Image (spheres, helix red, strand yellow):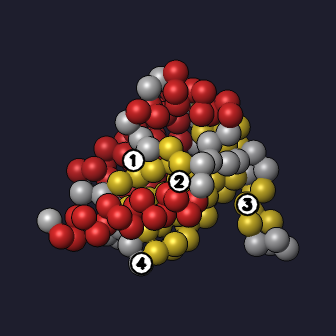
Amino acid sequence: MEIIKSSVHPQIIKVEIGSEYNETEKKLVGTVELDIENQAHFVDVINAIFEEGRVYVLVDMQHVSYIDSSGLWALFEGHKKAAQKSGKLVLLQPTKDVKRVLDITKMSSKIHVFLDEKQAIEQLISELELADRA
């Protein structure tokens, strides 16, 4: 599993998950499972982002073909830690199968799921501005 972090706004980090990084195309390719075998790596990356002081995280799920209970736990831990730090973790473009699991487990009612990256970023910016005014 490869995880790429990029800044999409001065206070928002995008986390992309895929099976490998294609040097030629400069992007992640291939599907990956977020499960017991790699959830610890995902949690480490999310925790490192929070330790840097960044608390608005957009997790791109378009290459995640499967998620098990440990993967759900990792997402929820990230969501919970972001909330504790007055931030937000949201999900972007989950595959049909992953979205189904998120819905069945009611995780999608706790963690906001977006299909459009621009809309997700706009929502996070809006929440940032509200937090700054408070």
What percent of the width, then of the height, locates residue 44? 45, 53
Q: Nearer the viewer, mark 3 or mark 2?
A: 2
State the mark number for residue 28: 3
User: In this orientation, does residue 6 appear?
Assistant: yes
Query: 127 left or right of 41?
Result: left
**Crowd around label 3: few <14 · some 14–19 · many ≥20 (10 Å):** some
- Considering every residue shown, the one lying at the far bottom of the view is 10
Q: Amino acid at mark 3?
A: Leu
Q: Nearer the viewer, residue 123 or 54?
A: 123
Q: Nearer the viewer, mark 3 or mark 4?
A: 4
Residue located beneath label 2 in the image: 59
Say if mark 2 contacts mark 4, CB within 8 Å. Answer: no
Q: Amino acid at mark 4?
A: Pro
Query: 112 left or right of 128?
Result: right
Residue located beneath label 1 in the image: 78
Q: Earlier in the sequence, mark 2 or mark 1?
A: 2
**Crowd around label 2: few <14 · some 14–19 · many ≥20 (10 Å):** many
Cα gap from disc 3 to disc 2, whole angstroms: 13 Å
Q: Give the vertical position of 18 relative to 22 (above or below).
A: above
Cα gap from disc 4 to disc 1, whole angstroms: 20 Å
Residue located beneath label 4 in the image: 10
Q: Earlier in the sequence, mark 4 or mark 1?
A: 4
Q: Earlier in the sequence, mark 3 or mark 2?
A: 3
What percent of the width, then of the height, locates residue 98? 62, 33
Q: Give the vertical position of 101 relative to 126 (above or below).
A: above
